[in-house]
Image (cartoon, rainbow, N blue to C red):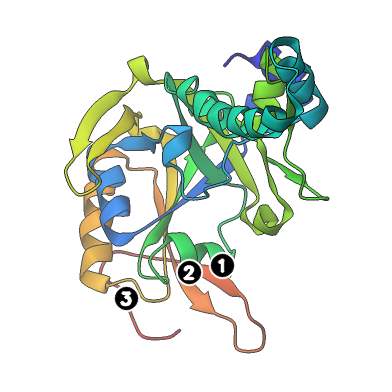
């Protein structure tokens, strides 16, 4: 998905010249794998955690018009309309099988993200240099919770792009940005526990600017990952979470290998 299509769809992009950071929250195992393998994981849209993910809405009047072109029986019309609506959701996903998506956040301090994606604060959050990842598009959160509108017969690239980057307003706390990549440019690895392929893309060590550890991260695990990352990326910085004593907030102190203390 190129920049021109994203711009035509009215999507906001992160300017690579600004030197902004983006953040990926990961579990204990996912975080370790991303650091030790120096990869970022991509998923097909149909494999994302939200069952509404990337699904458009269709204009029922358009569907009815298409049905009426071939079937004027009122008794069969409604059944045909519902059948097309359900079938085309499946077809829409099938058209998306040739690329993967990976997600980042623009914040490292969102408590819900630490709880949901970083294994209840046991995992970590990796800070990436956005300019070294490639084009990143900001997710749009629908204030009315309406999905992006797509044509059933011939959805345009702009319509498809909006569907891929629109989520319900409840997800706005994620402050999400996305990167799309062709599956043929990724490493394909079969995951037996998921019974499907997962996809990764290699990144250069300097793509990682920092590693942030959670309130419940294991100190021995922290030191192991820090030592490895320092060996391949001497400029990487390390941080550990600190719980605010007055508010439902966290902040971060710079972490030195072997200096863990229970001061949170």
Relative depth, front residue between 220 and 67? 67
Q: Which residue is drawn at 62% across and 76% down?
A: 249
Residue 149 in picture, x, y percent from top left: 76, 30
Residue 194 in picture, x, y percent from top left: 25, 46
Q: In which quarter of the image is residue 19?
A: top right
**Residue hosting label 3:** 260
Does residue 63 appear in the picture of this structure? Answer: yes
Q: Are marks 1 and 2 in contact (CB under 8 Å)?
A: yes
Q: Which residue is drawn at 26% across and 52% down?
A: 32
In the image: residue 64, left or right of residue 46? right
The label nearer to you, 2 versus 3, is 2
Residue 119 in picture, x, y percent from top left: 38, 66
**C-alpha gap between disc 2 and disc 3:** 21 Å
Q: Quadrant of the C terminus?
A: bottom left
Secondary structure at numbered mark 2: helix
Q: Quadrant of the N terminus?
A: top right
**C-alpha gap between disc 1 and disc 2:** 5 Å
The crowd level at tag 1 (other Cα within 10 Å; few <14, some 14-19, many 20+) is: few
Sequence-wise first label, 1 or 3: 1
Secondary structure at numbered mark 1: helix
Q: Which residue is drawn at 32% across and 35% down?
A: 39
The crowd level at tag 3 (other Cα within 10 Å; few <14, some 14-19, many 20+) is: some
How many marks are shown on the rendered structure? 3
In the image: residue 193, left or right of residue 185? left
**Residue hosting label 2:** 115
**C-alpha gap between disc 1 and disc 3:** 24 Å
In the image: residue 79, left or right of residue 43? right
Residue 200 in picture, x, y percent from top left: 32, 31
């Amino acid at each position: 998905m190129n920049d021109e299509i994203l711009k035509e769809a009215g999507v906001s992009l992160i300017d690579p010249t600004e030197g902004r950071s983006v953040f990926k929250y990961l579990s204990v195992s996912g975080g370790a794998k991303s650091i030790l393998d120096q990869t970022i994981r991509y998923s097909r849209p149909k494999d994302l955690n939200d069952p509404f993910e990337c699904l458009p809405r269709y204009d029922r009047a358009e569907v009815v018009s298409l049905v009426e072109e071939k079937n004027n029986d009122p008794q069969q019309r409604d059944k045909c309309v519902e059948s097309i609506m359900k079938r085309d959701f499946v077809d829409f996903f099938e058209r998306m099988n040739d690329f993967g998506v990976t997600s980042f956040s623009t914040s490292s301090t969102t408590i819900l993200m630490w709880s949901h994606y970083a294994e209840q604060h046991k995992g970590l959050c990796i800070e990436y240099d956005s300019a070294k990842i490639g084009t990143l598009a900001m997710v749009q959160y629908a204030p009315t919770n309406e999905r992006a509108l797509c044509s059933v017969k011939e959805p345009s690239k702009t319509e498809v792009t909006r569907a891929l980057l629109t989520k319900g307003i409840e997800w706005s706390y994620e402050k999400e940005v996305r990167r799309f990549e062709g599956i043929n440019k990724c490493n394909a690895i079969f995951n037996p526990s998921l019974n499907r392929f997962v996809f990764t893309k290699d990144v250069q060590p300097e793509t990682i600017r920092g590693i942030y550890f959670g309130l419940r991260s294991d100190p021995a695990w922290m030191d192991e990952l820090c030592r490895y990352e320092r060996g391949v990326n001497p400029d990487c910085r390390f941080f550990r979470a600190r719980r605010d004593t007055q508010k439902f907030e966290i902040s971060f102190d710079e972490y030195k290998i072997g200096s863990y203390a229970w001061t949170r």
